[in-house]
Image (cartoon, grey):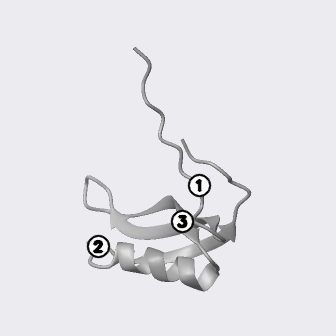
Amino acid sequence: MKDEITVMEPSQGNKFYSCTVLIEGESDSGKPKNYKEVHIVDGTNLEHVEKKVTAQMEGTMFPWKIIKCVETNINFVY
């Protein structure tokens, strides 16, 4: 049996952006450790995308900041 594939495209007039978020967390031993996450975000411009990432990251356990956010050439996500 073949798995059903879900295809995501940017919303009308939008682009996909790649945002790297630095999280100031801690290791399993409790020592400070920085983690990087890459978020693919559908948005109209950088300001819109940064607002979406900020809304998503609100209330997280550790301090974080966006360290990079760029428009991508991604047209489809499967």
Query: Whole-percent x and y of residue 20?
Result: 56, 66
Query: Whole-percent x and y of residue 17?
Result: 62, 66
How many residues crowd mark 2 within 10 Å: few (<14), some (14–19), many (20+)?
few
Residue drawn at x 68%, y 52% is 75
Give the amino acid at mark 3: Val
Number of numbered discs visible in the structure rendering: 3
Residue designated by label 3: 41
How many residues crowd mark 3 within 10 Å: few (<14), some (14–19), many (20+)?
many
CA–CA distance in space, label 3 to label 1: 11 Å
Q: In the drawing, does residue 45 fall left or right of residue 56?
A: right
Q: Which of 12 and 74 is in front in this view?
A: 12
Q: Nearer the viewer, residue 66 or 7?
A: 7
Residue 60 is tagged as 2
Dots 3, 1 in contact, CB < 8 A? no
Residue designated by label 1: 9
Query: Whole-percent x and y of residue 11?
Result: 57, 65
Name of the residue lying farthest toward the right? 73
